[in-house]
Image: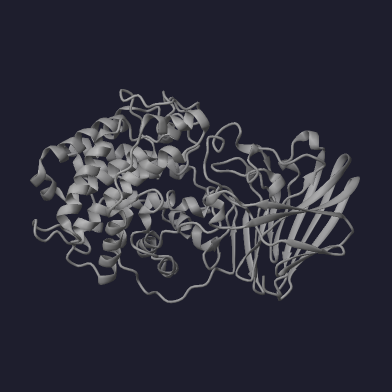
Amino acid sequence: MTDEVVPIQTIAMNTEFLNERPLSVGPADSFAFPSLSPSDRAALAHLAQRYQDEPYAQLTARQYMAFARTGERGIMEAPYFQRRRKLIAALMGVCAGVEPEMNLDTVVDGIWLICEETSWVISAHNGGEHDGVEKRAPLPLPDPEKPYVDLFAAQTAMILSLACRLLSEQLDGVTPLLRRRVRDEIERRVLTPFETRDDFWWMGVIRRDLCNWTPWIVSNVALAACAWVDDEARLSALLERASVMVGRYMDGIPEDGGCDEGVGYWNLATGAVLDYLQLLEARPDARFDRIEKLKNMARYPLDMWLGGDWFANFGDCDARPEVPGERLQYAGRRLDMPELIAFGARFRGDPVDPILDTPQLSRLLNNLAHPPVDAGAIEPPAEAWLPDLEIRKLHRGGATLVAKGGMNEGSHNHNDCGGFIYFANGEPQIVDAGNMTYSRKTFSEDRYTLWNIRSKYHNVPLIGEYEQAAGAQYRAREVVPTEDGLRLDIAGAYPPEAGVTALRRAFALDEGGALTLRDEIELTAPQTVTETFLLRHEPRCEGNTLVSGPVRIVPDRPSEIAVEEIPVTDPRMAKNFPGSLWRAAFTLPAARRHEIGFRIETTGDEK
């Protein structure tokens, strides 16, 4: 998308998610969505009842200051998001006809509480002056005279806008002041800054290395604008500005459509692009000229699917991420990709799932408006090659290899050039640990002190005591997909002082699902080399062989084997890998040249 691609002069809000199945709110005695299925109505009723006796959380200055003081995000974010979930739950209760009068009062309370918040920006994003620098010291408290638009200020504007749209008559029946207050707060906190500031880094004016922030924020701001801005000229200008920002984001997406933030962020990256384009669909003159790239972006989660609920999860991505089935089905319908319709059906889940993480009311409504489509069974693709991200996936003989080249920079990067995942017996066996709960360290100069981000805890070699380094200059080279795997050189991923002149790595997956990994390493001075494998199951040594659950790792030369247990204490990681992970290290004696191969195969045994 370029600055001129989408003519915005007369674009209006697309309300398909309100109109495709009529979800209009009736008079005071019949607030219900009239065409909900019994199962959807039951899901909304359960959601409303779940929060019914839980009061709105307090949100104090001390909670807000916790991030600046200790780096803990959850102390502020837990009550912040609870307020928004409870508001949405009560809103859905009204619309589903569940104790509508009581839930209407709860909606009123929630709207008022959120409007009374000094800022809608979460504490981790409260960085003071926003001159294009994303990473800066957080301020203890927000300045109401300098409103910033972060992910959740924009998302809050979306939630309040849709609440006021769905219950306009009922809220005005309480007092017209409510909707007027919402309009004024959204104007002051979100719309005016969006229109008048150019120094928010995610806008792409000062920086062009954009990430999911851009489409995520822009799609929510655009929805709020369409809900409140009556002046057609102003709305057209605002949407044109929004389209330019989305275009800048699209400029940074590789042609293969891969999301360097992983499948877990596709939901709020490509998924948010789809949210924005859905707003523009109402106009026959709106167009988008990057259909092939968008198709590749839409297909990315399918290519990274391993089976069950598991996905290849390089970088800050969970191994079992939230996957928005309705958005995938939407992409399949709009882009004529039937495989995405079937894939999306596989991951539809409960219609209220979109509010369980960061509350996305628009996605919940889309789930209600677009019922699941039974498109038949679907299996993970047998192979994929993403040439820009340099990710190779291959499935053979009941096992799947996913290996990567790439570079050690990018949004949510881990130092893992040459890393791989081996999936067999229905789960990852040689794993990428993925993400942990965010803290102040996660997006700071201390990021690469976190164990799950360091190369020492990825499936790549350690050269003496040298790990891979962070930065765009530290990257793989000569990355070549082969019929049975991937071949590459990852010497360039290590710092110069490691003295690595060549580190040629080759993966080959045979027809029976056995993986051969071979490394040829040349150094400027003799050093030990430690080949590392992060394992799902506790390993045991059988001579020079390591057995981990249903997997056997057999090196072709003797080495010193050490095993480290890594208890998974982080709650986010524990959702994917409860219990412990295990780091197995095969260390070779010091030499200037090393050659070693491993055969990795399933034993046929269960875990």
Q: Residue at x 52, y 42 (%)?
A: 438
Q: Toward the viewer: 34 or 43?
A: 43
Q: Position of residue 515 (x, y in %)?
A: 73, 66
Residue 189 as seen in the image, left or right of residue 34 = right
Q: Quadrant of the C terminus?
A: bottom right
Residue 282 visible = no
> Which quarter of the image is occupied by the N terminus?
top left
Whole-percent x, y for residue 6 in the image: 32, 45
- Number of marks in the rendered image: 0
To which quarter of the image does residue 582 belong? bottom right
Residue displayed at 53% across by 35% down: 440
Query: In the rendering, at what x and y percent does residue 553 appear?
Result: 78, 64
The chosen color scheme is: one colour
Q: Is residue 295 visible?
A: yes
Residue 111 in picture, x, y percent from top left: 23, 42
At a point 79% along the width and 33% down the height, the residue shown is 497
Residue at 30 percent of width and 62 percent of height: 46
In the rendered image of this protein, does residue 598 appear above or below residue 272?
A: below
Quarter assignment of residue 444:
top right
Residue located farthest toward the front when viewing the structure as drawn: 53
Q: Is residue 517 left or right of residue 2?
A: right
Q: Nearer the viewer, residue 34 or 256?
A: 34
Query: In the image, 587: left or right of 382?
Result: right
Vertical arrangement, residue 489 with respect to residue 199, above or below: below
